[in-house]
Amino acid sequence: MNNFLYGKTYDEISVICNSLSLPRYTAKQICDWLYSKGVNHISEMTNLSLKTRELLSTNYEAGGQNPSLELVSNDGTRKYIFTYGSLVEAVVIFDRDRVTLCISSQKGCKLNCRFCATGQQGYKGQMTPYEILNIFRYVNKQFPVSNIVFMGMGEPLDNWQNVHQAIQILVSDWGYGISPRRITISTSGIKQRINDLLTTTDCHVAISLHNAISRERMEIMPIEKASPIEQIIKTLRSYDWSGQRRLTFEYIVFDFNHTTAHIQALVTLLKGIECRINLIRYHQTPNSNFKGANNDAILKFANNLNAKGLRTIIRASNGEDIFAACGQLAGVMK
Ligand code: SAH
Ligand code: SF4
């Protein structure tokens, strides 16, 4: 196992070709078969000689695994469960001409945010670049994916090397050639990695904020202790956000985090940064006693923030009935 070609970079495939004494251009051909044409078997790579295909097949296979389960929500949202040792979920959301794949980065999560089903479930292991991309490969064959958001299970910055490799394959010419402006990476913020995220990709960035008062944020997001949001913002400020790349702050509106004090804290924290705020409805998770704010309160909060000059929208919730909405992904087959 694990000698899959799928999930490898052009450089890695070049090294393999070299070790098998195959010409350098073979690496390009293999990438083309894997990522542009999407074959499932080395035998289908028909512009490689039979001998080359046999040689490759003695040590490698193309890779590609189907999900164990697919669920369809009343609103059309689909959830896929892949068995990678433990269960990993992905969600596809259809919105007009957009097909958005919400992809996972880890098997569970170590960060333990109190409101999140993945956090409550704990950490089961890292996902390999192959495992991350295999989700994209499968879904993209069913429905051509237009946007990818790393908002499934796990914290992308806690598996940065593998997530970064998966992104390289998604955006490179020899890979899928997807624009990084169609990819959003969502993070609760890990101070040691935030700079890597900004400097080694061009993807959009979403920061899970949920409370701008540090002491309160710490109560719901333990990562605030090791990586205070103020330090994360300091790093974000060093970057120029005036171009095409988008910075968004995600904010679940609970029944306790939309007072005047919270608005003021947001204004102070985000002063002068080119960004948007996405207000999210709290999605109920099993065994939790959090409460979301009601619609009127969310609307009022959005209006107040906009009036203060913070560009704020309310994000639609999708797939709640199949536990496919943000924070409901716990790798449980219902
Ligand atoms: N670990 C990353 C990405 C995965 S979580 C992160 O935390 O950003 C994706 C988004 O769903 C985050 O903004 C997260 O805070 C939010 N989320 C988690 N639990 C939720 C819940 N129960 N209801 C609504 N959003 C939730
Ligand atoms: Fe992990 Fe994100 Fe859930 Fe927090 S919200 S526990 S960082 S997946």
Image: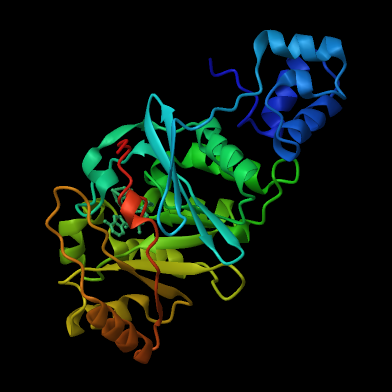
Image quarter in which the C terminus is found: top left
Tell which of 222 and 149 is nearer to you: 149
Q: Residue at x 61, y 61 (%)?
A: 181
Q: Residue at x 27, y 78 (%)?
A: 298
Q: Is residue 87 visible?
A: yes
Tell which of 333 and 46 is nearer to you: 333
Q: Is residue 193 left or right of residue 257?
A: right
Colour basis: rainbow
Q: Quadrant of residue 244?
A: bottom right
Q: Position of residue 285 (x, y in %)?
A: 22, 51
Query: In this view, which residue lies farthest toward the bottom?
Result: 307
Q: Is residue 168 visible?
A: no
Tell which of 141 and 195 is nearer to you: 141
Query: In this view, which residue lies farthest toward the front?
Result: 74
Q: Quadrant of residue 281?
A: bottom left
Tell which of 321 and 62 is nearer to you: 321
Count of number-bearing discs:
0
Above/below status of 306 relative to 276: below
Q: Quadrant of residue 320?
A: bottom left
Above/below status of 321 relative to 264: above
Q: Position of residue 272 (x, y in %)?
A: 43, 81
Q: Is residue 135 left or right of residue 317?
A: right
Above/below status of 185 relative to 267: above
Q: Position of residue 190 (x, y in %)?
A: 36, 51
Q: Is residue 158 left or right of residue 142?
A: left
Above/below status of 301 relative to 56: below
Q: Residue at x 43, y 54 (%)?
A: 194
Q: Position of residue 273 (x, y in %)?
A: 44, 77
Query: In this view, which residue lies farthest toward the left?
Result: 289
